[in-house]
Image (cartoon, rainbow, N blue to C red):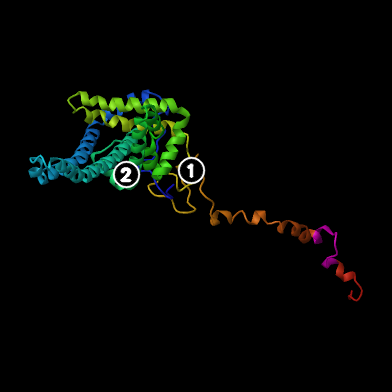
Amino acid sequence: MNPGYQSPYPRNNAFRTPRREIDISAIGEAWGIVSKNLGPFILAGLAMIVIQQAPSFIGSMIGTGMTMGMSNNPDTALMAVFIQMGISLPFTLIGVALGTIICGSIVLMALKAVRGGTPEVGDIALGFTTNPVGLLIAGFLVGLGTTLGTYMCLIPGLLLGGLWFITTPYMLDRGLGPIEAMGASWSTMKDNLVMAAVIFLLSGLAAALGVCACGIGILVTMPLIYVTQAIIYEDLTSDDQTGGFTGGTYPTDPFSAYSTPPAPGSADPFASGQAPTPPTAASEEPSAPQSDPAVTPEAPASEAPFGGSEPGPEDRPSSPGTPG
């Protein structure tokens, strides 16, 4: 948990009724959200494709230009292939990294839409300002795990993809690190393992349907998987009011309506039902006199002269040696 982290888009449970379970209808809801915000999501998908493919294209052109003469010679043709791969690989990795960060932006746009906001074109850059390094690490680990699992008879890949399905929302919404976010997603999805794998598969298939429309449709269908992630995340964590997977207390609560945490000792009017504000010294001072046991026994002693149970000043004139 990142102390003091605030979610870019505070949760609004009043905007929609959470299902509190994994439901296939989340894909239909995702399509409704994408269709209502088609412009920003299409531009985000286009940005992801261009940013991801442009470095690969540049690397390929450089490699081809540098080995043009070698490719025409049968003795050096094989060497040219390896040189081209060596040159284009770094560019390809750069493109994949940039595309992964844009995917994080689309997840944040999806969270904004699910919580009643309106995604904007400027939100496409949010991934570059909201834990981009964590996005790269999580993307690599999740991608590696699901790919290896897919090669093992497909089923393990589907299960791992389902268990880590909401890793990115956890990380970006709550400020978790990549490993912690993967653990949070695993713990949340493991009780619905079969449905987690099903929603991972179906959302991926729905996103891939755009390829059938001459490839252009992918700009519309590709955001579906990320909006579905946001919806499933909201459905399964709607009752979690602690603001963090580890059960942290305010100000680590990312769902506060404040853009920054309130000052120590200040009450948060939006934190009702959430984690309580830690007590401060100022709030403990009024209760100190009430809990002091020394005050109670002294009260009867001060009232004793009025009760006559002990000698007081009124008895002194009758004592010996006193004139009168």
Badge number at residue 157? none
241 relative position to 72: left or right: right
Mark 1 crowdedness (10 Å alpha carbons): few <14, some 14-19, many ≥20: few
| In the foreground, 85 or 191 | 85
Q: Amino acid at mark 1?
A: Thr
Farthest residue, direction front: 75
Mark 2 crowdedness (10 Å alpha carbons): few <14, some 14-19, many ≥20: some
Picture coordinates of residue 16, whole percent (x, y): 39, 29
Tell me the residue that label 2 is attached to.
136
Q: Residue at x 32, y 39 (%)?
A: 108
Residue 72 visible in image: yes
| Residue 69 picture quarter | top left
Magenta segment, which residues?
304-314
Q: Residue at x 41, y 39 (%)?
A: 182
Residue 254 visible in image: no
Which image quarter is the C terminus in? bottom right
Q: Residue at x 90, y 71 (%)?
A: 319
Badge number at residue 246? 1
